[in-house]
Amino acid sequence: MQAEQLPVHNTISQAAALIRASDHVVAMTGAGMSVESGIPTFRGKDGLWTRYGQPPMDGFKRFREDPVGWWQKQVNRQMDAHMIELRDALLAAQPHAGHHALVTLERAGVLHHVITQNIDGLDLKAGLENLIEIHGNRSRLRCVGCGRRTSLGDFVPQEPPEPCDGCGDVVKFDTVMFGEPMPSDTMTAAREQIDRATCVLAIGTSASVRPASGLLWIAKSQGATIVEINPFETKLTSICDVVIRTTAGEALGHLAGMFTQSAAERPDGPVSEVRYGA
């Protein structure tokens, strides 16, 4: 079904109706979610790659060839300028209203899982529990061999990490680099959620980064309804059932409010009409 272009308040009401009719609601968030916390995007008018140029697409290969040299560049801030800006933005960022709205929806039993393409960890800071960080988390380390992860918090390593205690392989940031295979555990978990989804909220994603974006088309092919929350048209727009043309913070804030009002105040039906599912 082609998405209807209606005023924001109408499309939010339509999205709420789809959510209420769904047994398993999953959200997928992209860079447009993080930008409201001051983290720049890569593409677009003011994106990092627009301003600095697109980096080499063989980052993982270079890391594997010289892990120690790669880490030394990180420690001494000799990495590409766009990475320095991104790292500083990640350290300063805090969750915004949209992140907190996702937590509200999760705690209300409305939202069952979130798959994020972002590496900022802001969903966790906001208190979200059912989360798959498909591209990793900047505040963790991960063994390339066995996938073992170690939390760093806000700490930035000042020297190359020791080899993995478990398998002896090289350790890197958990974030997925260009040319690096997606960690099998996160991809498996994400696909399991997509296969269960009867409604997917695509929030702030350009739907252009594979293989993550492909999950949205898989959901649609399996009969899930798709709600897009994005100020801009994307590759996904044409297959969406509802399109909400505003920011994540505004749209999710309104949605969360609709599901947390008392039954007497709720304009579109009492809470008992929501089918939460397993």
Image: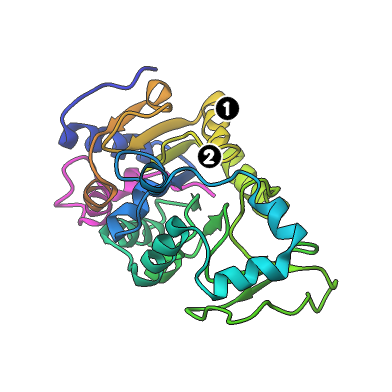
Magenta segment: 255-278
Q: Secondary structure at mark 2?
A: loop
The answer to whether any part of residue 245 appears in the image is yes
User: Is 240 left, or right, of 61 in this rendering?
Assistant: left
Q: Residue at image x 64%, y 52%?
A: 59
Q: Which residue in the structure is indicated by mark 2?
A: 197
Say what amino acid the circle numbered 1 marks: Gln
Q: Which dot marks residue 251?
A: none
**What residue is drawn where x is 50% and y is 50%?**
117
Q: Nearer the viewer, residue 71 or 275?
A: 71
State whether residue 204 is above or below residue 105: above
Query: Dot 1: few (<14), some (14–19), or many (≥20) neighbours within 10 Å?
Result: some
Decide whether residue 272 is among the magenta residues. yes
Residue 267 image offset from top left, x and y in percent: 16, 43
* Residue at 58 percent of width and 45 percent of height: 56
Judge left or right: residue 124 versus residue 35: right
Residue tagged 1: 222
Q: As drawn, is 201 to the left or to the right of 37?
A: right
For the point 25% across and 45% down, the residue is 247
Prevailing secondary structure of the magenta residues: loop
